[in-house]
Amino acid sequence: MNHDTPAGVGPRTRDVVSTHSVFGAPCWVSLTSRDLEATQDFYSALLGWRWRGAKLGEHFRIALAGGVPVAGIAAVASMWQMAVAWTPYFAVPDADVAVARARERGGTAAVGPLSFPPGRAALLADRDGATFGIWQGELVSNWETWRRAAPTFIRLHTRNAFDSAIFYGEILGWASRTQGCCEVEYAGGEVVLRSGGDVVARIDSGAVEAAPDPSVRPHWQIHFTVEDVPGCARSAEKHGGSVLSEDETEAILRDPDGAQFTVTSRTLR
């Protein structure tokens, strides 16, 4: 579930955006961790985030970048027996309908839908086990600023990109011709998801001609855009994290708690 109700993160703006107008698009990312203070220290040092409290209680925080809410953090992995991981959330007009569609198509519902006024959330897994969340209701304050700033980007690594696109499309209403829905295109062996003309997610399963790789553990990878990828990699190592792979434009990192994420050049989307 979401680690702070995405609406309620800071002062309410005059123009409230809801999932009825942007449904199907990625709208938030959350990290489940074990140690709140250590998590805050690591991401502050790495990405320059500042923090504010969240309505759900003392185990929860909201990360801010330049005053804009970027992500939710919840130190409940041990308490709730949940995996330490970053999770993307998608906007839906009706959480119950989305969960029912996921189950009908072979997905599972781990948590919810649960009410977090002014909305509802659920944590799901697709047919291949990749975890994702859904949110129904008002979006985080300044959501349009968050979207335009593009502080985050998500990519699904899976065994069959086209099959996954059909699964998510049927649940989230992608390419449904409804106003506000996401557009889907196939380019370079990837499925590319656009919202309002902007690329917001990609689904990748490797070379088009290759058979699905049974060793791939399907998962949504969270990308944070940064100015200096090599510098972030060195900072991660310095503050107790690790580097899984690295080049000049992208590095896959692991925080001290074990959560995996990617830092990406601002020019690479």
Image (tube, helix red, strand yellow):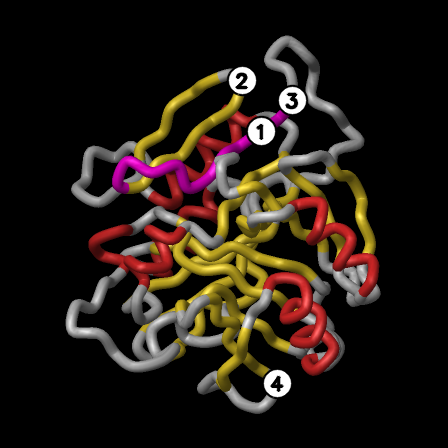
**Label 1 – label 2 distance at C-alpha:** 7 Å
Q: Which residue is mark 1?
A: 204
The amino acid type found where label 3 is placed reads: Gly
Indicate which disc, 2 or 3, sits on the residue closer to the N terminus: 2
Near-viewer residue (64 or 121): 64
Query: Mark 4 to mark 1: distance in Å?
Result: 34 Å
What's under tag 1, amino acid-wise?
Asp
Q: Position of residue 199 (x, y in %)?
A: 39, 36
Question: Which residue does the numbered mark 4 point to in the structure image?
Answer: 59
Seen in the picture, residue 80 relative to 27 is either above or below; the reply is below
In what element is the residue under mark 3? loop
Q: Are marks 3 and 1 in contact (CB under 8 Å)?
A: yes
Find residue 177 and name its label.
Answer: none
Residue at (46, 44) in percent of width and height:
104
Q: CA distance from mark 3 to mark 4?
A: 38 Å
Identified by mark 2, the residue type is Gly
Q: Which residue is labeled 3 in the image?
A: 206
Image location (x, y in percent) of residue 77: 71, 73
**Are dots 2 and 3 in contact, CB under 8 Å?**
yes
| Stretch of the chain drawn in magenta | 196-205
State the SS at label 2. loop
Gap in angstroms between the C-alphas marked 2 and 3:
7 Å
Looking at the image, do the residues carrying marks 3 and 4 touch, with CB atoms under 8 Å apart? Answer: no
Residue for point 47% across, 54% down: 151
Residues packed near mark 1 inside 10 Å, few (<14), some (14 to 19) or many (20 plus): many
Q: Which mark is residue 189?
A: 2
Q: Earlier in the sequence, mark 3 or mark 4?
A: 4
